[in-house]
C-alpha cells in the first residue's frame, strides 16, 4: 500500500539575477509500506532536492506530496505531525550530529516530541531500546558519549536511531553510506533493511551506487537533470538497463571480475565516444528536447523533441525515443540493442 | 626507461604521531614500486594508508614522525638516493619533480582566491626558475589541454569548475614537472561513478602516454582490483596482504581481504548475503599481542591471540611466477600453526580440486582439513 505519494513534483531555485533553475521537473512516484525505493542519479541530478522537498525543507514550486492520500501539511501542528511520520537520514554523520551534545540528548528530544510525558527512567529505557534497535551496545555507555567519541558507522547508527525516535512511517535516506568506509557500508544498509522489515517502513534510498541500489530495493527510479529517465523493478533496471544514461551509469561501476583485455577495450571505446561528443556538448542548447542527448551515443534529430515515458517491459519504463517503437508510433529508430 | 625496475622502495617504515601515548600509525611497512606499475594501497579509514603516502614523499609534519626505516628513490639510470639523508633543499628537488601527489579533496587543495594560471605559475617559479613568463603560460595551457580542460580556463578559479574538473586540474598540476611517480590519495572518492570513471580513464591514458608509475590509495577495493597491477592491503598500520591484483580478487589469502571483497555487492551477479567486516579497527596506541585483526576475524584460532603474524609467501601450491611475490600475514597460512592449510575460500586446497599433493596436504587430509 502506498504511504507517501509524490505527484508532478517541481522544484525551482532562484538564481542570482532572477533566473530560475529547475532542479526537479515533474516527478511522480510512490513509496510503499515495507518496501525500498531507490532513487539513483549522478551529482546534481536533483536527488537531494527531492528528499528535501518531501522532508518539507524546501518548498515545491508545483506538484503535490500526499501522505496517506492527504496533501502534506505546510504549517503549524499539522506540519510537525507530518515530520514525526516522515523522517530523514543525511549523508554526513559528522555534520548531522551536534558535537556539543551527548548521544542521549540527540535521542531524548525527538522521543519527547512524540511522547510528551516521557521522563526519568521511562525515558532512559526508551533511549536504550532505540540504541539497541540500531545495534549500539552497551546502550548506557553509548548514550553518555559525544559524537567525536564514535566512529563514522556508529554516528550514522545514532542518526538512524534519532530518525526512528518519532516512530515514523517513512524514512528518507539521502546517501546514508557514501561517507562511510566500504567495509561498514553493508552493516548500515543491512540495518536499514532489517528496520524497514521490522517496522514496516517505507524507505527511500537515495544513492549513486547502482550495485547497492539493486541489492537493497525492490524498485529503482533513475534521475537525470531533474527528471525520471527510467524506472522499474530493481533487477530489471540493472540487468537490462534501457535508457542510454542508465547504461552508462551501470557500465561506469568498477567491475573487479573483468579481465585486463576487456577493461582496455571498454576504455578505448569510451574514449573515442567522449572525444566525438565533446564538441557538440559545448554548443548544445538544452532548452528543449532530451536532456541527455549531448552525452548520448544514440542521439539523432528526433532527440531535439522531448521524449515521453515509453514502456520497455511490464512495469519498466524509459524516457527515450529508442523505445518509441513499442508505443506504436512507428519505428523511429532501429531498436538495435543499446547494450552494445 | 626499463620497465620493471624499481623506482621507489620503502623498507621497514614506521611512523608515529607523538603524544602521551604515541599513535603508531604505520608499523614496519615495506613496499616496492616498479617503473610503469600501478601499486594499489587499500584499507579502512585510519589504517595508515595516507600517513604512508606522506612518509614516502617525506611530507610528514609534527606530531607525525618517521621513527624507523628507509626510503630509497632509484632515478632512471642514476644512482639510488636515500631520501632519509636529504636536506630540505634537496628534498625540494625530489618532491613534485620526481614524485608528486594528488590529494583527495581537490576542493581544498586548490587555492580558492587565485586563478588556475597563477597556481601553475607557482609550481614553475619554485621548481623551474629558468622558465620565463610566456613559457610558463604555454606549459600551463598545454597541461590543461592534456587533461581535457579548455585551456581558456586558465584565467578561471577553482569554484567555477565541477568536482571532476577540479580533480583533472589537480592531476595536471601533479604532472606539470613530468614526475616518475605520482601518489594519488583517494583521487576519486568524492566524485560520482560516471565522473570517477572518466578520471580513471584519464589517468590510464596519461600513464600510457607519459609512462609514470602510480601509487593509488583508496578504501574502494573493487576499484583497485581493476586498475592496479599489485595490491597492498593495510590494516592497523601494517600491510597484511601484498598480492598481484588480477588474482587476489578471486582468491584472497587474508580473511580481512576476503571481508573487504564481500563488502560490496556485485552489480550484475547473483544476489548473495553481504556481510562486510563487522567490528572496528583497534586502537593504534596499543601494542598488539597477537594479530591486530584477530578480534574481528571469524577464522581466529590459537596463535592469533598471542603471536603477531609476519608476512610470509602464500603457499607454493598456488604456483605461478607470482608465488614468491604474493605474501600474507596470517597464521592460517603458516604450515607450522595450521598444518592442514587455510580454508578453501582463502586459497586452501578445496576438497576435490586437482592440486598437486604436497606433504602439507597429506597431513591436512589426515586431520580432517576444511574449515574450523
Image (cartoon, rainbow, N blue to C red):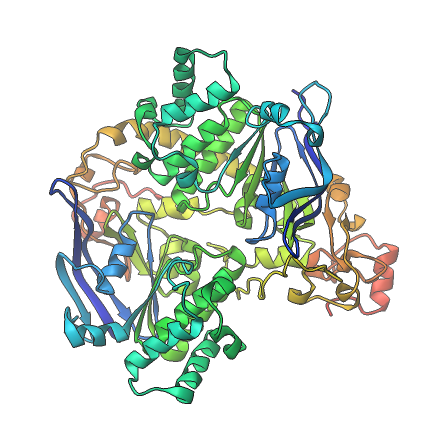
Is residue B365 at least partly visible in the picture? yes
Give coordinates of residue A69: x percent, y percent. 17, 74
Query: Is residue A340 something that shows in the picture?
Result: no
Of the pair B163 and A270, the residue shown nearer to us: B163
Is residue A282 left or right of B127 when viewed as pictured? left
Identify whether A97 is placed above or below A111. above
Name the residue rendered at 39%, 34% in the picture. B111
Give the percent coordinates (x, y) of residue B183.
56, 35
Q: Residue at x 39, y 74 (%)?
A: A105
Q: Nearer the viewer, residue A94 or B41?
A: A94
Looking at the image, is B127 positioned above or below residue B273? above
Picture quadrant of residue B73: top right
The image shows a total of numbered marks equal to 0
Q: Position of residue A68 (x, y in %)?
A: 20, 76
Query: Please, which residue is most extreme toward the front here?
Result: B20
Quarter of the rendering containing residue A196: bottom left
Task: Residue B113: give x, y in percent of width and height.
Answer: 34, 33
Report whether B327 appears left or right of A51.
right
Report the side of B263 relative to A214 (left or right): right
Which quadrant is the C terminus of chain B positioned in? bottom right
Query: Which part of the image, by quadrant, shows the N terminus of chain B?
Result: top right
Q: Quadrant of residue B3?
A: top right
What residue is shown at x 32% (from left), y 44% (from top)? Answer: A244
Amino acid at each position: 500500500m502506498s504511504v507517501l505519494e509524490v505527484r508532478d513534483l517541481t522544484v525551482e531555485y532562484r538564481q542570482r539575477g532572477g533566473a530560475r533553475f529547475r532542479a526537479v521537473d515533474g516527478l511522480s512516484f510512490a513509496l510503499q509500506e515495507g518496501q525500498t525505493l531507490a532513487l539513483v542519479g549522478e551529482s546534481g541530478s536533483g536527488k537531494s532536492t527531492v528528499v528535501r522537498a518531501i522532508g518539507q525543507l524546501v518548498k515545491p514550486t508545483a506538484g503535490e506530496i500526499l501522505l496517506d492520500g492527504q496533501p502534506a501539511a505546510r504549517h503549524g501542528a499539522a506540519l510537525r505531525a507530518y515530520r514525526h511520520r516522515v523522517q530523514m537520514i543525511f549523508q554526513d554523520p559528522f555534520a548531522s550530529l551536534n558535537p556539543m551534545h551527548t548521544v542521549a540528548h540527540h535521542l531524548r528530544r525527538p522521543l519527547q516530541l512524540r511522547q510528551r510525558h516521557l521522563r526519568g527512567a521511562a525515558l532512559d529505557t526508551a533511549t536504550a531500546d532505540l540504541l539497541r534497535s540500531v545495534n549500539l551496545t552497551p546502550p548506557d555507555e553509548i548514550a553518555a558519549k559525544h559524537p567525536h567519541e564514535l566512529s563514522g558507522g556508529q554516528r550514522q547508527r545514532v542518526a538512524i536511531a534519532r530518525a526512528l525516535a518519532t516512530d515514523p512511517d517513512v524514512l528518507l535516506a539521502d546517501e546514508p553510506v557514501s561517507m562511510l568506509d566500504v567495509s561498514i557500508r553493508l552493516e548500515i544498509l543491512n540495518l536499514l533493511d532489517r528496520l524497514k522489515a521490522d517496522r514496516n517502513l517505507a524507505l527511500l534510498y537515495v544513492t549513486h551506487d547502482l550495485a547497492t541500489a539493486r541489492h537493497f530495493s525492490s524498485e529503482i527510479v533513475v534521475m537525470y537533470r531533474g527528471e525520471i529517465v527510467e524506472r522499474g523493478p530493481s533487477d530489471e533496471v540493472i540487468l537490462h538497463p534501457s535508457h542510454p544514461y542508465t547504461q552508462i551509469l551501470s557500465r561506469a561501476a568498477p567491475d573487479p571480475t573483468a579481465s585486463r583485455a576487456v577493461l582496455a577495450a571498454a576504455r578505448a571505446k569510451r574514449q573515442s565516444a567522449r572525444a566525438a561528443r565533446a564538441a557538440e556538448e559545448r554548443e548544445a542548447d538544452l532548452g528543449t528536447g532530451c536532456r541527455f542527448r549531448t552525452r548520448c551515443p544514440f542521439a539523432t534529430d528526433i532527440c531535439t523533441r522531448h521524449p515521453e515515458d515509453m514502456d520497455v517491459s511490464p512495469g519498466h519504463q524509459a524516457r527515450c525515443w529508442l523505445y518509441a517503437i513499442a508505443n506504436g508510433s512507428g519505428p523511429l529508430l532501429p531498436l538495435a540493442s543499446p547494450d552494445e | 626507461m626499463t620497465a620493471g625496475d624499481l623506482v621507489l622502495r620503502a623498507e621497514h617504515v614506521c611512523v608515529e604521531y607523538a603524544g602521551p601515548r604515541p599513535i603508531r600509525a604505520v608499523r614496519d611497512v615495506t613496499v616496492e614500486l616498479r617503473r610503469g606499475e600501478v601499486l594499489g594501497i587499500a584499507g579502512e579509514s585510519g589504517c595508515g594508508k595516507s600517513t604512508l603516502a606522506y612518509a614516502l614523499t617525506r611530507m610528514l609534519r609534527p606530531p607525525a614522525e618517521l621513527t624507523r626505516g628507509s626510503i630509497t628513490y632509484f632515478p632512471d639510470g642514476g644512482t639510488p638516493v636515500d631520501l632519509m639523508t636529504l636536506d630540505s633543499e634537496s628534498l625540494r628537488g625530489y618532491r613534485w619533480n620526481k614524485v608528486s601527489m594528488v590529494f583527495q579533496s581537490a576542493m581544498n587543495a586548490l587555492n580558492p582566491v587565485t586563478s588556475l594560471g597563477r597556481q601553475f605559475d607557482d609550481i614553475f617559479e619554485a621548481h623551474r626558475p629558468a622558465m620565463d613568463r610566456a613559457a610558463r603560460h604555454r606549459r600551463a595551457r598545454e597541461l590543461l589541454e592534456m587533461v581535457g580542460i579548455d585551456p581558456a580556463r586558465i584565467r578561471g578559479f577553482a569554484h567555477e569548475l565541477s568536482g571532476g574538473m577540479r580533480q583533472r586540474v589537480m592531476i595536471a598540476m601533479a604532472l606539470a614537472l613530468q614526475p616518475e611517480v605520482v601518489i594519488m590519495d583517494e583521487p576519486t572518492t568524492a566524485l560520482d561513478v560516471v565522473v570517477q570513471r572518466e578520471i580513471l580513464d584519464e589517468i590510464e591514458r596519461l600513464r600510457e602516454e607519459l609512462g609514470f608509475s602510480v601509487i593509488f590509495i583508496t578504501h574502494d577495493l573493487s576499484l583497485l582490483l581493476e586498475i592496479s597491477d599489485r595490491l597492498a592491503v593495510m590494516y592497523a598500520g601494517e600491510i597484511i596482504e601484498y598480492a598481484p591484483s588480477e588474482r587476489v580478487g578471486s582468491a584472497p589469502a587474508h580473511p580481512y581481504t576476503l571481508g573487504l571483497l564481500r563488502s560490496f555487492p556485485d552489480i550484475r551477479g547473483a544476489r548473495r548475503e553481504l556481510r562486510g567486516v563487522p567490528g572496528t579497527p583497534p586502537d593504534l596506541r596499543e601494542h598488539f599481542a597477537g594479530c591486530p585483526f584477530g578480534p574481528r576475524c571469524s577464522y581466529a584460532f590459537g596463535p592469533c591471540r598471542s603471536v603477531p603474524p609476519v608476512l610470509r609467501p602464500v603457499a607454493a601450491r598456488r604456483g605461478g611466477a607470482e608465488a614468491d611475490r604474493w605474501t600474507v600475514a596470517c597464521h592460517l597460512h603458516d604450515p607450522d600453526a595450521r598444518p592442514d592449510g587455510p580454508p578453501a575460500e582463502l586459497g586452501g586446497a578445496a576438497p576435490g580440486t586437482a592440486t598437486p599433493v604436497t606433504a602439507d596436504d597429506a597431513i591436512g587430509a589426515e586431520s580432517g582439513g576444511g574449515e574450523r
